[in-house]
Amino acid sequence: MKQEHFKDAMNAITNHIEYSITHANFKKVEDAVSKIIETRESGGKIFIVGSGRSGLVGKAFAVRLSQFPERAYFKVFFAADVARKVEDSDLIIIVSGSGRSASAVHSAKKAKEIGAGVLAITSKQESELMNWVDMPIILSGGARDDNTSPLAPLGTLFECTAMIFLDCIIAEIMKELNVSEDELQHYQLDDL
């Protein structure tokens, strides 16, 4: 293995994340944190939607939300439950790099028909998903090019950025609800 290629890949990914941090819309981040907390406080449920690796990033976020202690507990569900269980007091959080996946678009459309809130984390401002979203968060790290593709194939740049972004959202929720890491550790679930 040549170290240069590995290091170039690591640099491409971290540079993308750094770009996203410096270009983040912090008002939208603040609004997202407020909406997530507001949904919990009003007794609403949070549905996490994502396909493929974006779905895995969403699941990691759901696991963290599930670790909050009883005094700050979040009711978290996955995409399959949207059509049957979503209500107008709920929030759908969609993680989709392309904004085109069928489950993302269908879940957002269904949620809007019912009157639930829809927050999307995506890299595409222009996509079918955006027709159904109340709170778009665009994580674009600059343009991909022929040099980046072999270092971070397919959706790698978005997925890595989304993972870190959502962990930062968790940190903000912890701060707002005054929840410590020890409390999260206490409620860590091994079966999710």
Image (cartoon, rainbow, N blue to C red):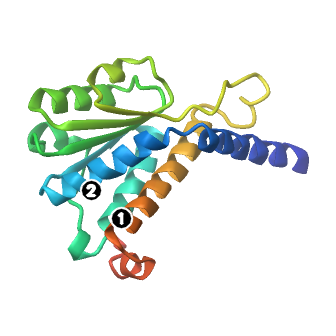
Q: Nearer the viewer, residue 119 or 57?
A: 119
Residue 55 occupies quadrant: top left
Residue 141 occupies quadrant: top right
Task: Judge from the rendering whether residue 50 lies leftward or rightward of residue 147; answer left or right.
Answer: left
**Residue that mark 1 sits on:** 176
Which tag, 2 or 1, sits closer to the chain's start? 2
Q: What residue appears at the point 10 percent right and 32 percent down from the top-left corner?
A: 114
Task: State whether residue 67 appears in this view.
Answer: no
Residue 74, position as x, y percentages in the image: 24, 62
Residue 133, position as x, y percentages in the image: 30, 28
> Please, what is the three-letter code of the amino acid marked with disc 2?
Ile
Residue 118 occupies quadrant: top left
> Mark 2, residues whose alpha carbon is within 10 Å: few (<14), some, or many (≥20)?
some
Q: Nearer the viewer, residue 1 or 156?
A: 156
Circle 1 SS class: helix
> Please, what is the three-letter code of the amino acid marked with disc 1?
Glu
Task: Judge from the rendering whether residue 98 lies leftward or rightward of residue 7; answer left or right.
Answer: left
**Residue that mark 2 sits on:** 37
Give the Cα separation between the discs numbered 2 and 1: 9 Å
Circle 2 SS class: helix
Q: What residue appears at the point 32 percent right and 68 percent down from the top-left corner?
A: 177
